[in-house]
Amino acid sequence: MENAFLGSIRRILCLAGDLFCKITTNRLNQFTTMRRAFLGEFEEIVLLVVAACPAEAYGVTIWEDLQQQTGRSITMSAVHATLYRLEEKGFLSSTMGGATAERGGRRKRFFTLTALGVRALNDVQQVRSRLWQAIPPGKFQLIGG
């Protein structure tokens, strides 16, 4: 009787373990897909600015380049929030630089593109290229553009 009971418990635990593995795998697949598939317009522009920076990219240089390239007035807090969100998503990584006297002993956080960030930008570029190529010649003239 005791052996049958233990056998039942073992079977239940094995089934629960299998179910947990399937759920975990599905959640990880969904997270990876979501992370790769969804990149907002502002996030894309921020990634492009970081990629285009000839020197080390940090908040102020990114903010200045964004405003210059887009012609928009952008708050520094919007830039920082986006940089940290992109880092959370795995598109950027950051390192802290050394403290400098000109910054009152504060350190700069430098941002660089990750492999996932490069892949995201390449994916977006391919989609945009396909869409632009799909527009029939003369379409814009027909609608007054």
Image: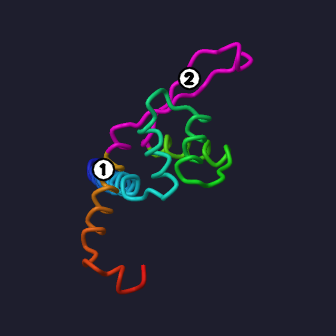
In the image, what residue type sits under mark 1?
A: Asn
Residue 99: x percent and y percent? 64, 15
Image quarter (top left, top right, bottom left or bottom right) of the C terminus: bottom left
* Residue 122, numbered circle: 1
Q: In the image, is residue 122 part of the stretch drawn in magenta?
A: no
Q: Nearer the viewer, residue 21 or 141?
A: 141
Which residue lies most toward the top here? 101
Residue 41: x percent and y percent? 48, 58
Q: Residue at x 54, y 46 (%)?
A: 85
Q: Nearer the viewer, residue 15 or 41?
A: 41
Q: Regarding mark 2 in the picture, which secondary structure is present there?
A: strand
Q: Name the residue under label 2.
A: 96
Residue 62: x percent and y percent? 55, 39
In the image, what residue type sits under mark 2?
A: Met
Which residue lies most toward the bottom here? 142
The image quadrant of residue 112 is: top left
Q: Sequence-wise, which precedes: disc 2 or disc 1?
A: 2
Residues in magenta, as a range = 90-118
Q: In the image, is residue 109 part of the stretch drawn in magenta?
A: yes
